[in-house]
Amino acid sequence: QVQLVESGGGLVQAGDSLRLSCAASGRTFSSYAVGWFRQAPGKERDILAVISWSSSNTYYADSVKGRFSISRDNAKNTAYLQMNSLKPEDTAVYYCAAARSPWSLRNAAYEFWGQGTPVTVSS
């Protein structure tokens, strides 16, 4: 079992940066893929970025490619999402999730979820 807690969200202006953290409990976190997702009001939850257990593979959605960067520190049981050049359309609740697999791009594979951290980007 893995428990995830996100932090680092907040209110920023367009063009600013934020770094989200995802702290995990459980010894198996280091062997799981981690994904960052977001859900804006009235919209579905979208996958943004994924990192494999060893950090050797990453994936980014087109909407954040070149602006966001996913990383992890397995020694600290923590994953990160560095968000640069934020836009008002990035406003959403951001979630981290873990999949019981070293790598997966399937939303359904992510069975462990944090509670979410809100990000608001003003214009």
Image (cartoon, rainbow, N blue to C red):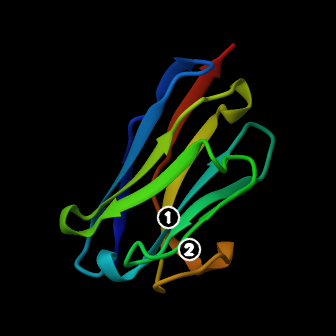
Q: How many marks?
A: 2
Image point 53% across, 19% down: which residue?
12
Q: Residue 53's image quarter?
A: bottom left
Dot 1: element: strand
Q: Are marks 2 and 1 in contact (CB under 8 Å)?
A: yes
90 and 26: which is toward the camera: 90
Q: Position of residue 37 (x, y in %)?
A: 60, 55
Q: Residues within 10 Å of mark 1 (few under 14, many from 20)?
A: many
Q: Amino acid at mark 1?
A: Ala
Q: Amino acid at mark 2?
A: Tyr
Q: Position of residue 26 (x, y in %)?
A: 25, 74
86 and 107: which one is in front?
86
Q: Nearer the viewer, residue 54 or 93?
A: 54
Point out the residue furthest to the left here: 75
Q: CA distance from mark 2 to mark 1?
A: 6 Å
Q: Position of residue 44 (x, y in %)?
A: 77, 52
Instruction: Of the two numbered discs 2 and 1 on the same chain, state the one appearing first in sequence.
Output: 1
Left or right: residue 59 compared with residue 10: right
Q: Quadrant of residue 88?
A: top right
- Residue at x 26%, y 69% (from the top left corner): 74
**Mark 2 residue crowding within 10 angstroms, few (<14) / some (14–19) / many (20+):** some
The residue tagged 1 is 97
Image quadrant in which the N terminus is located: bottom left
Q: Is residue 104 left or right of residue 33?
A: right
**Residue sitting at x 32%, y 75%:** 29
Q: Is residue 47 above or below residue 82?
A: below
Q: Residue at x 59, y 59 (%)?
A: 49
Residue that sits furthest to the front in the current view: 66
- Which residue is disc 2 drawn over? 110
Instruction: Describe the element under mark 2 as helix, strand or loop.
Output: strand
User: In the image, residue 18 lies at what x, y percent?
Assistant: 46, 32
Which numbered dot is residue 39?
A: none
